[in-house]
Amino acid sequence: MTKQELIDRVADSNKLPPELTKKMVGLVVDAVFAELRQYFVKSKLSRRVTPRFAFPGFGTFTKKQKSARRGINPRTGQPIVIPEAITVAFQPGIELKSLLNRFRPLAQARG
């Protein structure tokens, strides 16, 4: 799904007032993601504190630090060092997991 598709779906939702335009919805979506981005960039990561954002029914985003590690260049086969990096991980919530697994095709269910 693209950002525009998200805006269109939210704007067309029956749960919002009809006077709320797609442009207004777009501004809200932009503001929400800008705040999340700013939160994760500015928050400190330590052993005792792990910045996270939980959205009930959807899941949790967590700021994580990946250690430097050795890898292999797939083109050349040469060993390389992958530097440490800070990233954001996502863990789906219980409701989302159950919805995703509710309608599995029969072949997969037997699997």
Image: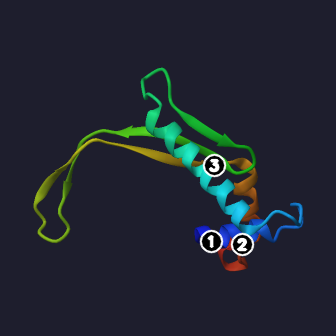
Residue 69 drawn above or below residue 3:
above
Per the model, the C-alpha gap separating discs 2 and 3 is 16 Å
Tell me the tag on residue 32: 3
Residue visible at 61% across and 39% down in the picture:
53
Residue named by callout 1: 4
The residue positioned 43% from the left and 23% from the top of the image is: 47
**Along the polypeptide, which appears first: circle 3 or circle 1?**
1
Task: Check the image and name the residue furthest to the top.
Answer: 48
Give above or below for 83 relative to 107.
above
How many numbered marks, from 0 up? 3
Residue bearing the label numbered 2: 8
Q: Amino acid at mark 3?
A: Val
**Residue 111 seen in render:** no
Q: Nearer the viewer, residue 111 or 63?
A: 63
Percent from the top left, x then y, of residue 54?
A: 65, 40
Q: Secondary structure at mark 1?
A: helix
Q: Is residue 104 left or right of residue 53?
A: right
Which residue is at the front of the view, 16 or 90?
16
Q: Is residue 103 left or right of residue 67?
A: right
* Quarter of the image that includes the C terminus: bottom right
Side of 4 where 94 appears, left or right: right
